[in-house]
Image: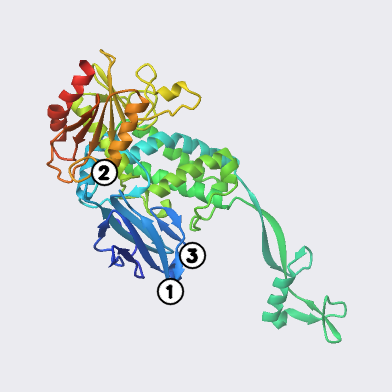
Amino acid sequence: MVMPHRAAASVSIIQDGRSTDISSQDDIVTVASSPLVLVVPWSNAEGSVEIDGACVKPVRQGRSGILSLDFSRSVGFHHLRIGRDAYAFATEDSKARIAGVLAMISALRDNGLSFGRQLFFADGSSISDERADFTWLWRWLPDIARTVEEIANRPLVARTLETKQSDHLGGRLDVPATLRLLRRDRTLVEYHEAGILRAGEGRYQPRKVVLRRSKRTADTVENRRVVLLAQYCIALARTLQSVRASGSAQMSANAERLSRALRTPTLMSIRRSIAVGAARTPTELFDRRYAFLYERYQEVQRARWGDPSTRFSALASFVKHSDELYQAFVLISLAAAIGAAPTDERLAARRPYASFKGAEVELYYDTEPPSEIVTTWRNATTRPDHARPDIVIHDTVTGRFVILDAKYRNDENRASADSLTEVQYYLNTFSISVAFICYPPSDTLFRDVRVLAARGDELWEVPLSPTSDVVDFVRGNVLPILQRYLRS
């Protein structure tokens, strides 16, 4: 496991009236997925505090800084950086502990999924999945290489003032700096009848002065960020050479383009060891080149610990929220049971086409379904809702469909009450009478598929846990129910 350097000061987690110390990096402390309070040393925290790559501001209380954070429904490992010190801790809940999350990610590995924000460690029992990194690099590396080349040829430059000592008075005199120099070394002053300095009745002339001059430089925050991102992409490409044979040649060619750009005089002049802040500069808002690279840099920051220039190995997958991970897990499990194949290298929301297709069925993922399949009644009004169910399964033979929602919540071994209420919305807006809700039961062996039925409406509760036989369970216990509504 690649760990941050050992933290120098103690940090405590207060949760449910109990305090847990996370100063040690040898054993990762695990706490409940719920609201908690972090107590950090104020002397360290006054500068900057980051949680999973996001800057947060503590409230001072004596010699400590207090951070109130809500990790509800957040299962995974978290990175805390306070100044130069780094810490790590994990959160889990009763619905799917860390092992369950690892099992879900294991089921998703072959699809090269990346989710964003929350980092998982890559140790021996890890979820390290280089396919996720490959997917990101495959998508962005050509555009990154092209943009960095553009900047190398026509970079942003800034004007800065530099000072230097001179034997001549010609130029822009830096009076305060000159006086400081002369006070430090009185031998640099000599008596002169027409001297520019007066002391008592005499006049004196400095033998050395400090001059200021304007200078154009490419060593700016924006260009430093460009260099760091380019270095990261080059190292990532080299690490991923063995992941997939297809595409490796193109990836190597684009990495070489970045290497050549970094060797140009402009980018060679940029200091590599100077850290860059997280704040976006005006140039990174209005210059399309720097705006694009800033977005990619931020994705790297969210996916990794600290600065991307410092960590090129132990690549890890990461997830944004447990809800999103569970949603993808359910989709993959359903598709595998149905025998549907992915239509794209990457699984992503809001795509206008099916994410999986089988011989007579297609699955839409987290997107507004095509209007020829189904649309909401509000979409015909002046205030459409553009509802996006988690999963829509469409039978291309009969034209029928079913809607499923994946909720990473439960009431013990049943779907949570608030989840049922949310899914009930689909009955209304799509003018349908049946919907399914998938959820992880507290007991992973619980397999009872139940229906809530009244007044012609039905809500089916489908327990799906990340077990080794989940696909067989879906094929034998869930598909027959789905087919009842897709084929009848």
Query: Callout 2 environment at 10 Å: few (<14), some (14 to 19), or many (20+)?
Result: many
Q: Can you see residue 134?
A: yes
Give the tally of numbered discs. Answer: 3
Which numbered disc, 3 or 2, marks the residue closer to the eye?
A: 2
- Taking the view exactly as shown, the residue that stands out farthest to the top is 397
Give the quarter of the image for residue 165.
Answer: bottom right
Q: Amino acid at mark 1?
A: Arg
Question: Which amino acid lies under the numbered mark 2 shown in the image of this protein?
Answer: Arg
Q: Residue at x 46, y 46 (%)?
A: 297
Q: Is 5 left, or right, of 230 in this rendering?
A: left
Q: Quadrant of residue 83?
A: bottom left
Q: What percent of the width, then of the height, locates residue 44?
A: 43, 68
Residue at 57% across, 47% down: 266
Residue toward you, 68 or 316: 68
Q: Circle 1 — which element?
A: loop
Badge 2 is on which residue? 409
Q: Quadrant of the C terminus?
A: top left
Mark 1 to mark 2: distance in Å? 38 Å
Marks 1 & 2, CB-CB < 8 Å contact: no
N-term-proximal mark, 3 vs 1: 3
228 displayed left or right of 418: right
* Residue 464 shown left or right of residue 50 in the figure: left
Residue receiving disc 3: 47
Identify the residue shown where x is 25% and y is 63%.
26
**Residue 57 in the image: above or below residue 194:** above
Q: Position of residue 275 (x, y in %)?
A: 49, 57
Does the CB distance between marks 3 and 2 fall below 8 Å?
Answer: no
Q: CA distance from mark 3 to mark 1?
A: 14 Å
